[in-house]
Image: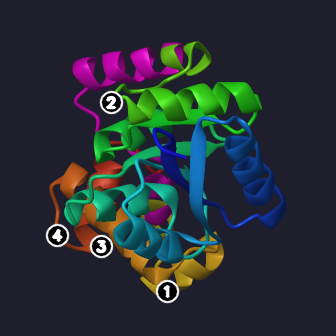
Amino acid sequence: MQGLISAVVVDDHPFFRDGLARGLAQSGRIRVLGEADGGREGLAMIAALSPDVAVVDYQMPDLDGLALVSAAMRDGLSTRILLLSAATDGSIVYAALEAGAAGYMSKDASRSEIVEAVADVAAGRTVVPPGLAAGLANEIRLRRTSDRPILSEREREVLAGFARGLSIPQIAGELFLGASTVKTHTQRLYEKLGVSDRAAAVAEGMRHHLLE
């Protein structure tokens, strides 16, 4: 087993998680140390096992992939994180890499492509497949040329919830996320808008036409 890349798999869908873990192990290049069915368990597993790579689902109910990456960066964990998602919007890929993810892959990628991505991430490279690179490049151009804050999909949903007068627990319930995850997105929203409370966030959102 010496020389193999160590990894953990974090995904709340058992069928996909088990298949992915099996595929990584069968590659002969990766040793799967464990599987977690949610972001909180995954973060604890990463902290306890210190794998080379964590392959993490972007969208999970208790602690999503973006929040997990942010928490891992905050805690100074050395594990490099590869996010997998069905969403391929350029703003989401940008937000993932900005938060500290080492790579972002579509869940439609083949087993061999994910294995190669894990190997690249373990070797210190940043992975964005060609199919997502154009959207990412466009997002970077938009951020350079626009004074309008660029919000992630989750941040836009949180802002829309605030505009409707919803509380963080109510937004969490609507989005099937943990309240702590919504709080993380809220903090990022506040930072991007330069505000410190919900009313100011809604006002800034209206001023920048983010609520249309």
Q: Is the Cβ of the residue at disc 4 closer than 8 Å to that at disc 3?
A: no
In this picture, residue 126 sits left or right of residue 212? left
Q: Residues within 10 Å of mark 3 (few under 14, many from 20)?
A: many
Of the image marks 1 and 3, the number of the one nearer the N terminus: 1
The Cα–Cα distance between marks 1 and 4, rounded to whole angstroms, is 18 Å
Residue 42: where, in percent of width, then height?
A: 50, 69
Residue underneath mark 4:
196
The Cα–Cα distance between marks 1 and 3, rounded to whole angstroms, is 14 Å
Residue underneath mark 2:
124
Q: Is the Cβ of the residue at disc 4 closer than 8 Å to that at disc 2?
A: no
Tag 3: residue type? Arg
Tell me the element at label 3: helix
Q: Is residue 58 visible?
A: no
Q: Report if residue 203 lies within the magenta region.
A: no
Tell me the element at label 1: helix
Magenta span of residues: 134-158
Residue underneath mark 3:
198
| Residue projecting furthest to the right | 15
Residue 173: where, in percent of width, then height?
A: 61, 81
Which residue occupies 63% across, 32% down? 115
Of the image marks 1 and 4, the number of the one nearer the N terminus: 1
